[in-house]
Image: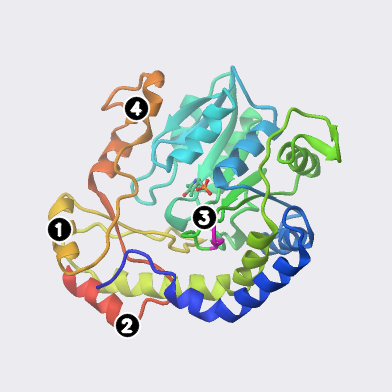
Amino acid sequence: MVPFVSFEAMHKEIKQEVTEKFKKVYAKNWFIQGEECRAFEEEFADYCNVKYCIGCGNGLDALFLILKGYGIGEGDEVIVPSNTFIATVLAVSHTGATPVFVEPELSSYNINPTLIEKQITERTKAVIAVHLYGQPAKMDEISAIAKKYNLKVIEDAAQAHGAEYKGKKAGSLGDAAGFSFYPGKNLGALGDGGAVVTNDGQLADKIRALGNYGSDYKYHHIYPGYNSRLDEIQAAFLRIKLKYLDRWNDDRIKTAQKYLSGITNPDIILPKIMPEVKHVFHIFSLRSKKREDLITKLNKYGIGTNKHYPTPIHLQEAYRNLNIEQGSLPLAEEISETQFSIPMYYGMNEEEVKVVIDAF
Ligand SMILES: *Cc1c(COP(=O)(O)O)cnc(C)c1O
């Protein structure tokens, strides 16, 4: 039995610290916007090597608040990859702007920078680069196009805590980045959480206000804002987990390396690590024309599998209004038809990794 994801090893390591921290926060009777959140914001900004971090409710909100912070809305267009988790696209459509899909590279599954320019119109305001599965997108190429057309570059770093591109941390590679601390992410809370990181002080101030009812100080509202904040208790837990993140990521990378050398089944396309990146393997993603047979076989051995993601966004009922026909984004469709993911989490032991490899 190898589950798709397990928190067991992680939680065993931090149980004592988390329990003590819980008691401390509980005793303080201060649960929203206090010292823990401020401290986490400082620590996470430092970790990402940026000036500002603003905690918020979740990863979707982080991306949405960035777009709102830049004044993006109705009549605007935002370029997004055609293969991503739906939150990337929801963040755009919730502002009233239109998501414009660009196909990925099959090597990295990240947005193909050479296809971006064709999709730029006078309405385009930003590009969201998703670091899918934990591997940074080609940020230099993306930034060069964005600069030429005066577009904002937004990172969806929800799967890429601690990932690097040319020695720089995910979160520091564009104008602003959104992170998710959903429990299953490489840095996860014990509930929902998210953050925006940026070097743009003006944006940071605006987002801090937007996420707190549009308020710059108590009962004074400069924007018709939202309620999206990072709880004290979650921030406190995240501060503990942040200290372990690099080590936990390194352990994922070791497991990935074992998979990469151990899985030799010719029906499988293994993930490729692009040059100059640190891929933190949020997901270990495979492709195969024989996907369903392989999944059946793995599941028979008690090995958990998943699909990231089984239906491309343009074919989801939620986006019927975009009128994008089947066949018009063939790479996103191809990935959704052939992709599957195998167990990847901190603390997978030799035996578990071997069971997965041998099952192929
Ligand atoms: C998880 C995820 C999000 C959304 O994060 P939530 O905290 O669940 O709102 C956004 N984008 C990507 C790529 C994700 O994987």
Q: CA distance from mark 1 to mark 3?
A: 28 Å
Quadrant of the rendered structure where residue 162 is? Answer: bottom right
Q: CA distance from mark 3 to mark 2?
A: 27 Å
Report the amino acid beneath label 1.
Thr
Q: CA distance from mark 4 to mark 1?
A: 27 Å
Examine the residues drawn in magenta and state their main secondary structure: loop
Q: Secondary structure at mark 1?
A: helix
> Local crowd at mark 1 within 10 Å, few (<14), some, or many (≥20)?
few
Q: Is label 4 in contact with label 3 (beta carbons under 8 Å)? A: no
Mark closer to the observer (2, 1): 1
Q: Is residue 113 above or below residue 300?
A: above
Q: Is residue 100 above or below residue 333?
A: above
Q: Quadrant of the N terminus?
A: bottom left
Q: Which residue is mark 4?
A: 317
Q: Which residue is mark 3?
A: 182
Q: Nearer the viewer, residue 141 or 127?
A: 127
Q: CA distance from mark 2 to mark 1?
A: 23 Å
Q: How is the image coloured?
A: rainbow
Report the amino acid beneath label 4.
Glu
Q: Nearer the viewer, residue 231 or 156?
A: 231
Q: Upstream in the sequence, badge 1 or badge 3?
A: 3
Q: Upstream in the sequence, badge 4 or badge 1?
A: 1
Q: Is label 1 in contact with label 3 (beta carbons under 8 Å)? A: no
Q: Which residue is mark 1?
A: 296
Q: Which residue is mark 2?
A: 350
Q: CA distance from mark 4 to mark 2?
A: 42 Å
Q: Residue at x 59, y 56 (%)?
A: 170
Quadrant of the rendered structure where residue 352 is? Answer: bottom left
Range of the magenta residues? 187-191
